[in-house]
Image (tube, rainbow, N blue to C red):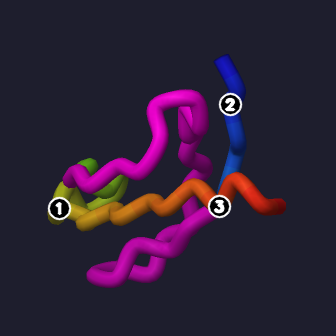
Amino acid sequence: MRVINKVIACPHCGHHQDISIDASCGDQDYYDDCRICCNPIHLRLHIDESR
């Protein structure tokens, strides 16, 4: 398992939060709720194997 940690900003309230991405799962498309305002955040992840 290859885990990548990133900091993102909620597009609704601007709160910065840490997310962990399991890069071994390849490209991903899912929603996660903001920990502060509870609005959904659409996350689209593309794993670039050339990097």
Q: Which of 39 and 28 is in front in this view?
A: 28
Q: What residue type is labelled 2?
A: Val
Q: Mark 3 points at which residue?
A: 48
Q: Which amino acid does label 1 sit on?
A: Pro
Find the magenta span and give its range: 7-31
* Element on which disc 3 rests: loop
Q: Distance between the residues labelled 2 and 1?
A: 22 Å
Q: Name the residue under label 1.
A: 40
Q: Which of marks 2 and 3 is nearer the N terminus?
A: 2
Q: Which of marks 3 and 1 is in front?
A: 3
Residue 10 counted in the magenta span: yes
Q: Mark 2 points at which residue?
A: 3
Image quadrant where one finds the N terminus? top right
Up/down of 22 relative to 29, above or below: above
Q: Residue 9 carries which label?
A: none
Instruction: Give residue 40's position: percent from left, percent from top.
Output: 17, 61
